[in-house]
């Protein structure tokens, strides 16, 4: 297959998968808001750190946190020194579970077009591509902001996490 055709197919596939995934996980939230809810499901972080993990400036992260707090999905803790931590409310934890379930359902449906052998081969190719992409992006948190981390680490080592450690 010609290199430019392969690159074009990869680009179209990547965008289509991203569009479907975001459509199904962002019903009432922005893409960065959905990513923030998933990130916060792992535990409280500062607003600045949350912004870094979802790829937002500090001012945009503050506005996003305001939106999440207004929707009763997140809350700010009382100040610990100068740092204010953001954590999920009970409704936020439910939203994170729903987001990850919708994402998994969409991606599983996409993969259903492949045979078991093709899915196995694709897994190896994706691991190699993710390792390469980490070299360009340089942030596992940013790359995996909408990931179900337990799904990626329950049977093997996460290729992005491994690239970050290397």
Image (spheres, rainbow, N blue to C red):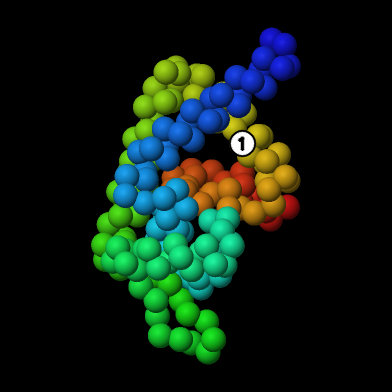
Q: In this view, does 27 lie to the left or right of 8?
A: left
Could you tell me which secondary element the residue under label 1 belongs to? helix
Q: Nearer the viewer, residue 127 or 157?
A: 127
Q: Dividing the picture into quarters, in which one does residue 6 lie?
A: top right
Q: Position of residue 94 (x, y in %)?
A: 27, 57
Residue at (45, 48) in percent of width and height: 31
Residue at (47, 53) in percent of width and height: 32
Q: Is residue 21 above or below residue 89?
A: above
- Crowding at dot 1, Cα within 10 Å, few <14 / some 14-19 / many 20+, comes out as some
Q: Which of 84 and 93 is in front in this view?
A: 84
Residue at (60, 26) in percent of width and height: 11
Q: Position of residue 43 (x, y in %)?
A: 43, 67
Residue 64 visible (yes or no): yes
Q: Position of residue 74 (x, y in %)?
A: 35, 67
Residue 43 visible (yes or no): no
The residue singled out by tag 1 in the image is 127
Residue at (40, 58) in percent of width and height: 37
Q: In this view, does 51 lie to the left or right of 107?
A: right
């Amino acid at each position: 297959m010609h290199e430019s055709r392969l690159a074009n197919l990869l680009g179209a596939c990547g965008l289509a998968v991203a569009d479907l995934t975001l459509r199904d996980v962002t019903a009432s939230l922005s893409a960065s808001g959905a990513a923030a809810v998933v990130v916060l499901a792992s535990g409280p972080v500062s607003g600045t750190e949350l912004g870094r993990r979802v790829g937002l400036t500090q001012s945009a992260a503050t506005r996003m946190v305001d939106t999440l707090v207004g929707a009763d999905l997140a809350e700010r803790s009382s100040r610990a020194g100068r740092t204010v931590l953001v954590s999920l409310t009970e409704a936020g934890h439910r939203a994170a579970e729903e987001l990850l379930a919708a994402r998994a359902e969409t991606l599983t449906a996409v993969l259903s077009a492949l045979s078991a052998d093709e899915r196995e081969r694709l897994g190896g190719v994706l691991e190699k591509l993710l390792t390469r992409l980490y070299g360009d992006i340089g942030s596992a948190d940013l790359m995996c902001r909408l990931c179900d981390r337990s799904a990626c680490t329950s049977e093997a080592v996460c290729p992005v996490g491994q690239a970050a450690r290397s």
